[in-house]
């Protein structure tokens, strides 16, 4: 029977909740039984000792069955999902891959690649997704923007982590272990963890921040072997880079003396790169540092003073405005209410 990460997450949530409830019930029943024994049998008597031993053995036996049932039920779904993913990796749709290879060396924008992926029906095919990921990387495109799923390794790692958390719940729930108690009760297989796992499994949590996008694009250029290859890669990544991502990439390229002028010329962006080499990179880094200092400051007057010092900086005002939109506390500190929350 087919399964998916949604079913696995719900199964884990249900089984661990059921396990904790039944565990608590067994412990309560054991405590009641021991109290009755103490109330009805002579303290220190042989009969009381035998009854306590029987109660303990019965409890341990019930607890062992409970653990096995919870583990078997949850792990069955996980192992079924592992098998399904392995089968997907082992299946190769050669005609579909041929279509992707036909455009693999053509520079693309994000919208072009997404439209192409939708047109050929690549969604759900593992190797088509991997091939499209390679094209996305060559062009400096975040795979999350075109809806590509996570790799097989990532998925298996997620299932391993979920299995590990289940095992820790079964091992430590109710145990007198202060280091694990909080994790078992509030962290392992919590709603937040399960939701995060579902997103990562489907590739939706892999969205990179601006700095990560810029670093990935830069390394795409940096790892090419020849100046011509670096120039082409440079052209591809800058074609799809906008705003702060573009500025960060240009900073990285300008600061790397191994990116030759020939590679910059081949890219078609020689003037932009030279502008950053000749001062804009240093100016952008100064604006970033100023913003870092502002983030650490809680005083309105101090923030306004620091911002005033960078009025002539080409990049600072844009970075500062974006920061205020993203940080409600900063906007409230400066203006009395968060920016970006106006009603229509």
Image: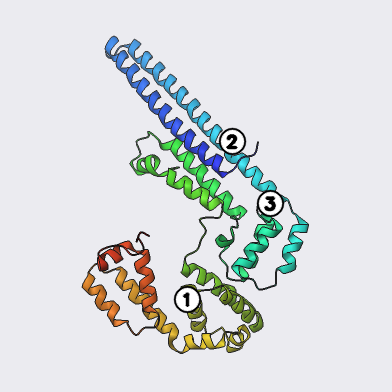
Quadrant of res 303: bottom left
N-terminal of the pair, mark 2 or mark 3, is: 2
Q: Residues within 10 Å of mark 1 (few under 14, many from 20)?
A: many
> Which mark is drawn over residue 76?
2
Q: Residue 252: where, in percent of width, then height?
A: 49, 78
Determine which residue is flagged by label 1. 248
Mark 1 or 3: the one toward you? 1
The quarter of the picture where the C terminus appears is bottom left
N-terminal of the pair, mark 1 or mark 3, is: 3
Q: Residue 174, relative to residue 194: is it above or below?
A: above
Q: Residue 294, relative to residue 31: is it above or below?
A: below
The residue depicted at 38 percent of the width and 42 percent of the height is: 186
Q: Residue 129: where, in percent of width, then height?
A: 65, 58
Q: Decide if residue 21 is on the left or right side of residue 139.
A: left
Q: How crowded is mark 3: few (under 14 residues within 10 Å), some or many (20 or more)?
A: some
The quarter of the picture where the N terminus appears is top right
Question: Label 1, label 3: how many angstroms apart (C-alpha)?
Answer: 36 Å
The residue depicted at 37 percent of the width and 33 percent of the height is: 174
> Which mark is drawn over residue 89?
3
């Amino acid at each position: 029977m087919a399964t998916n990460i949604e079913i696995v997450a719900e199964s884990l949530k249900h089984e661990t909740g059921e396990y904790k409830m039944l565990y608590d019930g067994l412990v309560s029943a054991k405590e009641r039984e021991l109290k009755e024994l103490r109330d009805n049998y002579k303290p220190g008597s042989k009969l009381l000792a035998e009854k306590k031993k029987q109660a303990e053995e019965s409890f341990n036996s019930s607890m062992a069955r409970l653990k096995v049932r919870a583990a078997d039920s949850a792990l069955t779904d996980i192992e079924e999902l592992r098998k399904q993913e392995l089968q997907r990796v082992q299946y190769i749709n050669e005609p579909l891959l041929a279509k992707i290879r036909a455009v693999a060396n053509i520079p693309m924008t994000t919208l072009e690649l997404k439209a192409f992926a939708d047109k050929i029906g690549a969604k759900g095919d593992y190797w088509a997704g991997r091939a499209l990921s390679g094209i996305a990387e060559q062009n400096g495109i975040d795979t999350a923007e075109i809806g590509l799923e996570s790799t097989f390794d990532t998925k298996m790692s997620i299932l391993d982590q979920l299995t590990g958390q289940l095992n820790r719940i079964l091992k430590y729930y109710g145990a007198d272990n202060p280091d694990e108690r909080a994790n078992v009760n509030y962290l392992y297989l919590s709603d937040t963890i399960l939701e995060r796992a579902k997103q990562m499994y489907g590739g939706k949590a892999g969205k990179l921040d601006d700095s990560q996008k810029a670093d990935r694009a830069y390394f795409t250029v940096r790892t090419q072997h020849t100046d011509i290859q670096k120039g082409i890669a440079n052209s591809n990544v800058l074609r799809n880079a906008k705003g702060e991502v573009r500025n960060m990439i240009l900073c990285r390229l300008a600061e790397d003396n191994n990116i030759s002028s020939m590679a910059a010329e081949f890219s078609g962006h020689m003037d932009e790169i030279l502008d950053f080499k000749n001062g804009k990179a240093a100016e952008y880094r100064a604006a970033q540092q100023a913003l870092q200092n502002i983030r650490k400051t809680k005083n309105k007057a101090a923030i306004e003073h620091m911002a005033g010092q960078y009025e002539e900086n080409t990049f600072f005002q844009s970075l500062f405005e974006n920061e205020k939109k993203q940080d409600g506390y900063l906007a409230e500190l400066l203006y009395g209410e968060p920016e970006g929350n106006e009603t229509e």
